[in-house]
Image (cartoon, coloured by chain):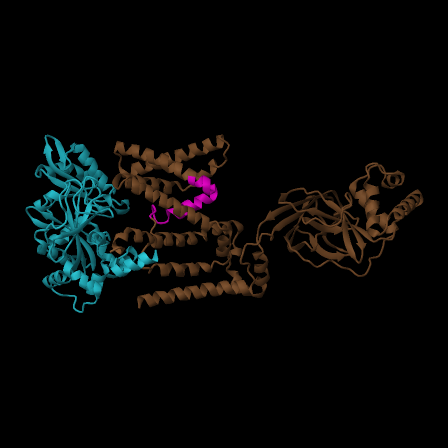
Chain colours: A cyan, B brown
Amino acid sequence: MFRIARNLYREGVLGINRRNAEYTLRYNERRLYPLVDDKVHTKKIAIAAGLAVPELYGVIETPYQIRTLDAVLESHPDFALKPSRGSGGNGILVISGRSKNLYRKISGILMTRDELKYHASNILSGMYSLGGHPDRAMIEYRVRFDPVFEAISYQGVPDIRIIVFLGVPVMSMVRLPTRKSDGRANLHQGAIGAGIDIGTGITLTAVSGNEIVTEHPDTGNKITGVKIPKWDTLLKLAAQCYELTGLGYVGVDIVLDKFKGPLILELNARPGLNIQIANRAGLLPRLKLIEQLQNRTNSIEERVSYAKKHFATDQISRIEKI
Amino acid sequence: MNRLHLFFLALLLTVIGLGLFLYKFLMLDFPLVPDENAYTWNIEAHIGFNAGLKPIKVSLFLPQNTNNFTIVNENFISRGYGINTMTKDFNRIASWSIRRTTGPQDLYYSAMVRRVNKKKKYVSMIPPEIENPNFEGAYLEAAESLIAEIRAKSADTGSFVAELLKRITDPQPDYNVSLLLGKQASKPKMIDLAVRLFSKAGIPTRSVHGIHLREHARNIPLAHWLEVYDNNEWQFYDPVSGSTGIPDDFLVWWRGEEPLATLEGGKNLSIALSTLLSQEEAIYSAVERERIKKPLLLKFSLFDLPIQTQAVYRILLVVPVGALLLVILRNIVGLKTFGTFMPVLIALAFRETELFYGIILFTILIALGMSIRLYLEHLKLLLVPRLASVLIVVILLMVGLSILTHELGLGRGISVALFPMVILTMTIERMSIEWEEVGPFEAFQQAVGSLIAATLAYLVMTTKYVEHLVFVFPELLLVLLALTLLMGRYSGYRLFELRRFKELSRK
């Protein structure tokens, strides 16, 4: 047991306790949390800062406003209905089109308008929010993911998670929905996580649960070695979230839209640790390297190139020797 | 800087906590473990009578310290009466007096009696004087012939006493004994006769009266004993069986032939004795002893609170122990539970139901509640009405379960009512959301985790030593706080993480 702990420490694996005590509690000020816990809020500051996000069609704040849903939906044939303060991808409803009066979910199942409104009222009552607090429902642009992911995801939208520490992207993975995860990009629910080489944007190993996989279980296509397009834009977008929120240790979730390119979906002030399993590498050496930096307030471009230089896969073995 | 600050804070708390603890333990002799033998009885004598117009004088014998018991605290409740206590021969007597009063009167004497175990024997080197037994005429002759008969059959004082008692208590007494006892041979009469015969034979003897201390009793009958002076010490004899030695639970009240209480100037005297066992611990004697010497420290102690409040704190003070355990289970082991402190609350409920039934009842309630909650899912209710419905159903289930177990004669059902139902409702709600969102497996995992945490918390919190330590030494909570604070900066791996990241350690 102690041997495993020693090995993990040598590999630089970050545990929950250390993440909380030495990173989130130290670098993320409590007062900044609302910026990222509420997605409507995040979206507003991102738009103000000129960062790309999926377009917001409308926000429902009170049960009375649910009836205004009709008007919003008239102009948009497809959309995503989400809780503003949801967690773990729960409560997200994606409508891909309609058939007469019915709405078609991405899985192909049809919903009536009443069912849609019921879902909205569930969101308002706090069913999907942390701690069950009353929430807002947001209706936004449905992301049409980039064709690069078509072969390696099952329904749902794959998203790219980048951990940004003090403005430097340190580790990244793409989360691919599977049949098991019911189209959701949540690793706990069975989605596949594939590490991405920061230097090149090419996928590395992939894990399903704790097992290493090389092919997508539903499509049978190879997951590793896929080049993520517009990788530099993605890294830059992620790095900018440091200035946007002031959070030192933040997980940035980005989707790659077919038409609009990388869009920020949400930010997370307590990003999960599974990214280490997907990358088969620990976070600690990279975080420590950045902590030792003298000049932290570099420009965004400098930070991105620093990350590409130091955290590229062929460089990582060098760091770990330090 | 931060870390140093925390370290010093924890050190300070530990030093204060341990310092107070050691001071109380070493200097004040506060017991470290619960003392099983330290029972305390509250005894009470109630004297009732009717007063005429004449001055009243009531005297009552009072119990006294013996090898087995000490009297801790005495109280006399008597409105308007003058009260006086004195020692006469081997007895203590209280006498109440009042010049003028009418109607029914109630006087109370109450005392706290604590069991002690003095090994020292009660020795008196000077043989007591023998009173004149006052036998006359035919009685004198009967007594003399009886004594002569027994003396011929016995070797020493012990066998003499045994033989004489046997003769007197014989269901078919011989001629001499039945003459001396008279027609109605009551037990006090037998003892009285025995005392007189022993005096006649030159053996110092006296009768002893008292009560057997029971857990809870009203109108306790007096018990009578004989004390015979032999080999420079008083020996107890059971007048009926003739056996020696005094039972452990016997509290000596007074000695001699006089009645327990006497009354002058009134009518219809009645005396009722009652006892109540209270399991206050030996700690009281320590507190009482030290209060006089060092009043400040003990002025603010838990023992000053009313008994019922103390009982509440007995439970409340173990909650921090459960909380610390939960910190360990969650942050160091990595066990997942529903809600942060829900397992502690469930553990508190287990105190009432006992562990085995507690787990069964909890599981049944959660399972039934879950199935109803999952059914309600189909009705698409709003959150608050849905929670309220689950709460109502939970209470109905509790009622049903109570009635069912009661009818089956299990007797455990009633205590299910002590489960915190709101907590149960929230658990059901969280579990069903977990079930829907993440899957049954995770929901079960967390439910089992909660149950394990609750069980462990129960086992720790109900340990007698733990309960005793935190109640007698509440300052230990400061040490607990220090530990918790230090654990707040624990940044090592959780036990369950070792398994989660195992893949990475093999590289």
Give the percent coordinates (x, y) of residue B363: 39, 38
Kindly give the residue lying farthest to the left in the view shown. Answer: A259
Is B21 contained in the magenta span? Answer: no
Considering depth in this image, is B145 or A62 the residue closer to the camera?
B145
Kindly give the residue lying farthest to the front in the view shown. Answer: B507
Q: Quadrant of the C terminus of chain B?
A: bottom left
Q: Is residue B67 visible?
A: yes
Q: Is residue A142 visible?
A: no
Q: How many marks?
A: 0
Q: Give the side of residue A23 with respect to residue B167, left or right.
A: left
Q: Give the side of residue A135 with respect to residue B229, left or right.
A: left
As drawn, A8 above or below B362: below
Q: Give the side of residue B248 with respect to residue B191, left or right.
A: left
Q: Give the side of residue A164 with respect to residue B457, left or right.
A: left
The residue lying at 82 percent from left, 45 percent from top is B165
Is B343 contained in the magenta span? Answer: yes
The residue lying at 71 percent from left, 56 percent from top is B84
Q: Main secondary structure of the magenta part?
A: helix
Q: Quadrant of the N terminus of chain B?
A: bottom left
State the image quarter where residue A97 is shown.
Answer: top left
Instruction: Please state the extent of the stretch shown in magenta in the rendering.
Output: B336-359
The residue lying at 18 percent from left, 64 percent from top is A318
Considering depth in this image, is B438 or B240 the residue closer to the camera?
B438
Give the percent coordinates (x, y) of residue A314: 14, 60
As drawn, B183 above or below B295: above
Give the percent coordinates (x, y) of residue A317: 18, 61
Give the percent coordinates (x, y) of residue A25: 27, 59
